[in-house]
Amino acid sequence: MNRRVIRRRDREGTADRTRLRTRLAAGTIALGVIAAGLLQPPQETEARWADGDSGRATFTANLARPVATAQCLTESAILGLGPRVTMYWRVPAEATGMTVANVQYGRLVNGAMRPATSAELAMVTTTGTPNGYTTGVQGGLLSGLLGGSVTVGIRFVNAEGWTSSWLTADATIALLGLATSCTNSSRAS
């Protein structure tokens, strides 16, 4: 009886070892297949929508800002009434085709330059040639200047609507027109 039990145990032990070896071999093969799939680089393909054609273009924009030719000037009539700011400027050489017809006038409102309204434009005069213009601003664009300060400006606008930066005049008139100052500067559009 003892021998039968031992033989049965030997047979069961051998069967268990065989099953274990089979499982280990299957697992090793599976890991090998997975690893081989992960290690291979992806194959190159050409997408159906790929097109070898390309395009190329160049463009130039005449967006150089007007150039100051002299310091701006602030004038005040009797007791600071009727203030006037005068700007002296020219069209820069790199702004080919730009003239006074391409100029837009504006003023600083709440920290940003904005184009002048048609009513404000009635108080703007510009004379001269592309080599040197004189622009005078008074009235509407200078509202609140009596005893204060204002920033007025000019910029170019090309046919496509692109704009240059502003050439500005920062003007100050003391109360009663006793002291005036004006400084040219530039501001982003």
Image: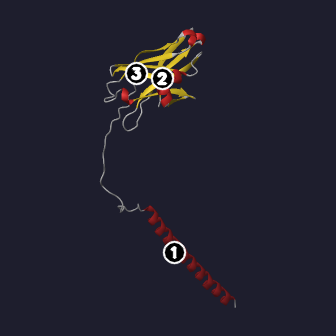
Q: Identify the residue shown where x is 46% and y is 63%.
A: 38
Q: CA distance from mark 2 to mark 1?
A: 94 Å
Label 1: few (<14), some or many (≥20) within 10 Å? Answer: few
Q: Residue furthest right?
A: 1
Residue type (three-letter) at the residue carrying disc 1: Ala
Mark 3 or mark 2: which is in front?
2
Residue type (three-letter) at the residue carrying disc 2: Met
Q: Identify the residue shown where x is 69% and y is 88%.
A: 2
Q: Answer left or right for 151 relative to 162.
A: right
Residue indicated by mark 3: 126
Q: Quadrant of the N terminus?
A: bottom right
Residue 123 marker? 2
Q: Identify the residue shown where x is 41% and y is 62%.
A: 40
Q: Position of residue 182 (x, y in %)?
A: 50, 15
Residue indicated by mark 1: 26
The answer to whether residue 98 is above or below residue 78 is below
Q: Position of residue 166 (x, y in %)?
A: 45, 27
